[in-house]
Amino acid sequence: EAGVAQSPRYKIIEKRQSVAFWCNPISGHATLYWYQQILGQGPKLLIQFQNNGVVDDSQLPKDRFSAERLKGVDSTLKIQPAKLEDSAVYLCASSPTWREGYEQYFGPGTRLTVT
Amino acid sequence: DAKTTQPNSMESNEEEPVHLPCNHSTISGTDYIHWYRQLPSQGPEYVIHGLTSNVNNRMASLAIAEDRKSSTLILHRATLRDAAVYYCILRRYNNAGNMLTFGGGTRLMVKP
């Protein structure tokens, strides 16, 4: 089966610009996650969707980050305006459901560099 | 989620077994122990998980201490492709979701 797809793979922008990342989860997976991974650290959850509803966005910096999941399938994460500290890899993951016993499948990530 | 403690790095020789330790002294009765690994320039991938009993799958084995305050991920024969960062994560099953809280992990280096 096809894995989690993300695009673009790399993005370089200047601070105060806007950027958007796209994620296509594995077909049929109800739960979708966005993580931020700063160099040298483990991934940090930003937001979790169950179908098209938000389950948890407590760690999403809502003044500049936004995310949506269109029709409960694809998802977009946006940063506006970007700061230097937003430089990181943004990972998307999906799982069949949020319940225990189901692993999360991660995409390859989008590496963002803010200059 | 409760906190886990792992060594920053470990080295192993190719084709030898590797034991990756994880301490989780504040684990609660409903915390599951999950292991993920992240190969260079890739997203994390699931390795194994368990609650109380030891678990085996095609990738690895998970040995859980009787008091559940520690666990060990066992790779039976390390290959060069097993060089990665291994994350030990405790996850509590509740209605709030399926969030994984990653720590710093253990960077495993495999020598030929």
Image: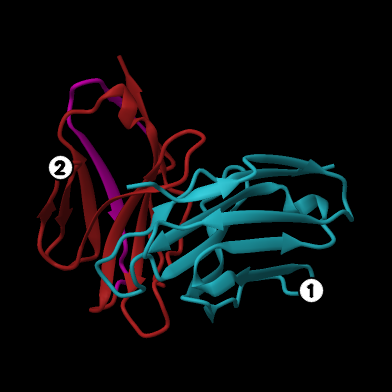
Chain colours: A cyan, B red
B23 lies above or below B106: below
Are the residues under badges 1 and 2 in a single subunit? Answer: no
Closer to the camera, B59 or B51?
Answer: B59
B32 sits left or right of B97 in the view: left
The magenta segment is B10-27
Residue A65 position, x and y percent, is 73, 67
Secondary structure at numbered mark 2: loop
Disc 1 residue type?
Asp
The residue located at (41%, 66%) in the rendering is: B3
Closer to the camera, A49 or B34?
Answer: A49
Disc 1 and disc 2: Cα gap in Å?
Answer: 44 Å
Closer to the camera, A12 or B81?
Answer: A12
The residue located at (26%, 24%) in the rendering is: B79
Secondary structure at numbered mark 1: loop
Closer to the camera, B43 or B110?
Answer: B43
The residue located at (31%, 78%) in the rendering is: B93
A44 sits left or right of B58 in the view: right
Residue under label 2, please give it: B58
Q: Magenta stretch containing residue B98, yes or no?
A: no
Disc 2 residue type?
Arg
Location of the N terminus of chain B by quadrant is: bottom left
Regarding residue B108, the answer to whether it shows in the image is no
Residue under label 1, please give it: A63
The chain letter for the residue carrying disc 1 is A
A14 sits left or right of A37 in the view: right
Total number of numbered discs in the rendering: 2
Residue B59 position, x and y percent, is 20, 41
The residue located at (81%, 50%) in the rendering is: A84
Location of the C terminus of chain B by quadrant is: top left
